[in-house]
Every structure is written in structure tokens, then in C-alpha cells.
């Protein structure tokens, strides 16, 4: 056996050099070219390879590249030896950065999407092998640069005039003429809602789809999306008519939008290695505890809460997921604050429940929190995001709203949830909605 499994960084961000143990005896050798658990533990991305390609090169000096593909790859050799070189062709400060190394069976390199890949054989009958995390497609967009580019200045061991290159590779543009490969995009679903609008403002470069752009409940629609163009999907779409969800039609709609659609979204995220951000709710709890942590088990009281809990369970199966629990959302649209402001202006003196306690969440705060999770590459799983301040009742918030609008807060009177619900078909509410 030679060496230990080691993963080290390179001058190109995201590109990793892997030293592979090679087990040798009189019969030959054996190596683990891709060992998910060991390599991920050492820092290699869990990139989800779906295709294994092998290139046989009979002659010394066979030179291929430089191609930047729209997928990640793990390269090595099964026989022989190569000189490999890469050029960062992605948008950003490291565009044009280079790295080169000699590869034998004991070396592998993880090459992130958008980094130009090339190699030159140093021995006859070299077998070059690489794993990729997307299936080859004739429609895929490549970014290429000429192997002889003066800026990259790759020190080819065999001069290019003595090497064997394809006419196509010889015709690739110089670095100065290359259009950098754009990064994968973020997709916002439910962009027309209160949170969706805040997310669009916080992520101006994201692709934003409303219900008219993409029907989450249409299973066939998912097949028409080029999911590999994205790395993150934020699901801000939901059926949120809590009381209507208790009716026959509403119950079916709630399950169709909040659960069945999320199943399809989870399938797409898993199959394409996407990060799925899913917005959840305090309604997944019965509210008996004064504060709810991220590890509390489900105990929903009504249909809406049941659908949100079911969706959380589905999303938790996606390898890269953030379940964002929040409460009492206030944003651009109809909400409790706007309702109270309207009542104050109309001269209505409302009775507001004082036995439901929680925190408001402004959509700007929620969008900023989601963005921070993504930027910080926070651990996948459940995260609570609300606005700050001490927990308050709806009654207290209503009084503050009247006062802020220039009206007498004493116009608001307290009542209980039970009293307020008399004669109405209301869904049960958790008495405590405060998230830790």
C-alpha cells in the first residue's frame, strides 16, 4: 500500500487534489477511486456522480482541452500517467487562475463546474477516467480556452507543436476572448407572495417565478425545468388559508399545494443535487410549550399545520435542505398589521385575542435570515427565523399598531380565543407560537 487518503486545496477555489492509497502486490494494484464517505469526511463535496467516462489514449503526447463543462467532475487515471492542467473560467476574481499537476493512479482531482480541464499523456496506453454529476447532453453549454493561451502559460511537458491535438481544440479562443461561465442561479418559487417579494428584493439576481410562471401542483411541469441551471431553490409558495383548510375543498387544496407539490420539488432537488430551502410554520406544533426548539416533535392541531408538518418530513429527506420555521409573518400584502391599521382608520374598535403568544416576523428579516443561511453555508437541517423582541399577544400587537397609526390604543379590547371563535368556523391555533 502506498500513501494515505488526503485531500488538499489548490489555487483554484473549490478545486481539490486527492492523494489516493494504492494497494499493490505481485498481481498488480487496487485503489478506491471514489469513496463517498471517506472523501466527504475529508472535505470533498458530496457531488453525486451519475456517469463514469473513460478515455483511452494510445500515444504519448495526446493532448485534450481546455474544456469547462457545466457539471462537476472527479478525474484520475486507471493506467499510465498524464500532465493535467486547469484554468478557472468562471465569473469572478479568480477567472484565469491556473493549476497543473502530474497524475498517476495514486492521484485524483475534483474539478468544480466552470473550471477548464485539460491533459497531456506522458505514457502510451493511458486510461483517463472521470466521474461527472450530470448526464452528457448535446445541449450542454461549454466554455473553452486555447491550450496555447499565452496568459494561462501552461508549461506543457511535450511542446504543443510535437503533441497530438484535435483541430477543434486548436481553434479554441484565447483567454481574453472567453466569456466566463456564469454561476448557477437561485430560483424563488412563490415570488408573488409576501415573503416572495422580500426574497426578490434581497436576491435581485435570482430567477423569480410566481404561480403563473410555474404550477407547483402540475407534476409534468417539473420535467420541463432545466434544474441543472440552478443550485438553490427557495420554496416560498404555500397554501396559507388556515381556516379554509378545515373545509372539504380547502383540505384538498392544502394537501395538494403544501405536500404533493413539495414531494415533486424534493424529488427534483435530490435528483439534481440542489439545495432546497423550504419555509415552515409554528403551526406544526400544538403550542403547549411556551417556546419551540428546532428538535421538538410534530404535534399540529389543524389541517394547515398537518400539511406543513408533512412537508417538513418530506423536505428532510433531501440531502441539501434548510427547513426554515417562522411565525406570524408580516410583509407587503394583507396581514394582521395592515388589517389593524385599516380598522383603526375606519373607526372600528376590535376585540383581539390575548391568549395567543408569539413573535412577529417581518418578511425583510426572514429573507435576510434565509440569505445568511445560504451565504454562511450553515449546517443543513431545521432553523428557526423570526424577528426579534419579547413575545407578545395579538392583543398587545394590535394596541401598538393603533398607537403607531396615531389612534388611541384603548380602542382595542382583549378577548379569549374561545370567545372570539364563537359562531365562527375557525381552525385551532397554537396558544404559544414563540420559536427559540
Image (cartoon, rainbow, N blue to C red):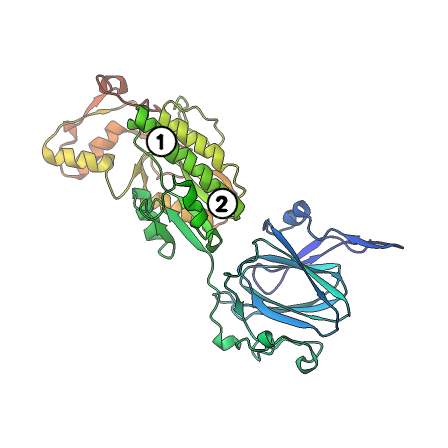
Lower position in the chain sequence, tag 2 or tag 1: 1
Is residue 300 depicted above or below 260 in this figure?
above
Residue found at x 39% / y 23%: 286
Q: Which residue lies furthest to the right in this view?
A: 26
User: Which mark is on residue 78?
Assistant: none
Residue found at x 55% / y 73%: 145
Indicate the quadrant where residue 308 lies. Answer: top left
Q: Residue furthest left?
A: 347
Residue 357 visible? The answer is no
Q: Total marks drawn?
A: 2
Give whichever of 279, 166 is nearer the camera: 166
Horizontal side of residue 244 vs 182, given as left or right: left
Q: Mark 2 points at which residue?
A: 269
Q: Disc 2 versus disc 1: distance between alpha carbons?
A: 22 Å
| Secondary structure under the numbered disc 1 in the rendered image | helix
Indicate the quadrant where residue 279 lies. Answer: top left
Tell me residue 278's x, y (percent).
Answer: 43, 40
Residue found at x 57% / y 80%: 150
Tell me residue 12's x, y (percent).
Answer: 58, 64
Q: Which quadrant is home to the C terminus?
A: top left
Mark 1, residues whose alpha carbon is within 10 Å: few (<14), some, or many (≥20)? many
Indicate the quadrant where residue 100 lies. Answer: bottom right
Tell me residue 142's x, y (percent).
Answer: 52, 65
Give whichever of 423, 396 is nearer the camera: 423
Horizontal side of residue 321 vs 163, given as left or right: left
Residue 99 visible? The answer is yes
Mark 2, residues whose alpha carbon is within 10 Å: few (<14), some, or many (≥20)? many
Q: Mark 1 points at which residue?
A: 254
Amino acid at each position: 500500500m502506498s500513501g494515505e487518503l488526503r485531500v488538499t486545496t489548490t489555487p483554484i477555489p473549490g478545486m481539490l487534489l486527492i492523494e489516493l492509497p494504492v494497494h499493490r502486490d505481485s498481481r498488480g494494484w487496487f485503489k478506491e477511486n471514489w469513496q463517498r464517505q471517506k472523501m466527504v469526511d475529508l472535505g470533498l463535496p458530496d457531488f453525486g456522480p451519475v456517469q463514469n467516462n473513460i478515455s483511452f489514449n494510445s500515444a504519448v503526447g495526446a493532448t485534450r482541452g481546455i474544456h469547462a463543462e457545466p457539471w462537476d467532475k472527479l478525474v484520475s487515471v486507471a493506467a499510465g500517467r498524464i500532465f493535467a492542467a486547469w484554468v478557472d473560467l468562471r465569473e469572478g476574481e479568480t477567472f484565469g487562475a491556473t493549476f497543473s499537476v502530474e497524475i498517476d493512479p495514486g492521484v485524483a482531482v475534483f474539478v468544480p463546474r466552470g473550471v477548464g480541464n485539460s491533459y497531456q499523456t506522458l505514457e502510451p496506453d493511458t486510461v483517463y477516467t472521470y466521474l461527472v454529476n450530470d448526464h452528457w447532453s448535446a445541449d450542454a453549454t461549454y466554455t473553452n480556452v486555447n491550450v496555447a493561451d499565452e496568459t494561462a502559460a501552461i508549461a506543457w511537458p511535450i511542446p504543443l507543436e510535437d503533441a497530438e491535438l484535435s483541430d477543434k481544440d486548436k481553434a479554441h479562443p484565447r483567454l481574453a476572448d472567453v466569456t466566463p461561465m456564469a454561476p448557477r442561479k437561485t430560483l424563488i418559487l412563490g415570488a408573488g407572495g409576501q415573503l416572495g417579494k422580500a426574497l426578490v428584493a434581497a436576491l435581485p439576481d435570482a430567477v423569480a417565478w410566481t404561480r403563473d410562471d410555474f404550477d407547483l401542483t402540475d407534476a409534468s411541469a417539473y420535467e420541463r425545468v432545466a434544474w441543472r441551471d440552478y443550485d438553490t431553490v427557495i420554496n416560498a409558495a404555500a397554501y396559507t388559508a388556515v381556516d379554509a383548510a378545515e373545509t372539504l375543498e380547502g383540505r384538498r387544496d392544502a394537501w395538494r399545494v403544501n405536500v404533493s407539490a413539495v414531494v415533486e420539488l424534493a424529488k427534483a432537488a435530490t435528483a439534481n443535487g440542489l439545495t432546497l430551502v423550504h419555509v415552515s410554520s409554528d403551526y406544526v406544533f400544538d403550542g403547549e410549550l411556551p417556546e419551540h426548539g428546532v428538535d421538538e416533535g410534530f404535534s399540529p392541531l389543524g389541517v394547515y399545520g398537518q400539511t406543513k408538518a408533512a412537508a417538513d418530513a418530506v423536505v428532510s429527506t433531501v440531502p441539501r435542505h434548510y427547513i426554515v420555521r417562522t411565525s406570524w409573518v408580516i410583509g407587503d400584502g394583507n396581514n394582521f398589521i395592515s388589517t389593524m391599521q385599516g380598522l383603526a382608520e375606519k373607526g372600528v374598535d376590535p376585540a383581539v385575542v390575548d391568549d395567543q403568544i408569539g413573535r412577529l416576523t417581518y418578511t425583510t428579516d426572514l429573507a435576510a435570515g434565509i440569505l445568511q443561511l445560504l451565504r454562511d453555508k450553515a449546517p443543513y437541517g431545521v432553523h428557526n427565523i423570526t424577528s426579534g423582541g419579547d413575545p407578545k399577544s395579538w392583543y398587545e400587537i394590535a394596541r401598538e399598531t393603533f398607537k403607531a397609526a396615531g389612534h388611541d390604543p384603548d380602542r382595542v379590547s382583549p378577548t379569549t380565543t374561545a370567545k372570539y371563535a364563537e359562531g365562527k368556523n375557525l381552525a385551532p391555533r397554537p396558544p404559544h407560537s414563540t420559536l427559540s
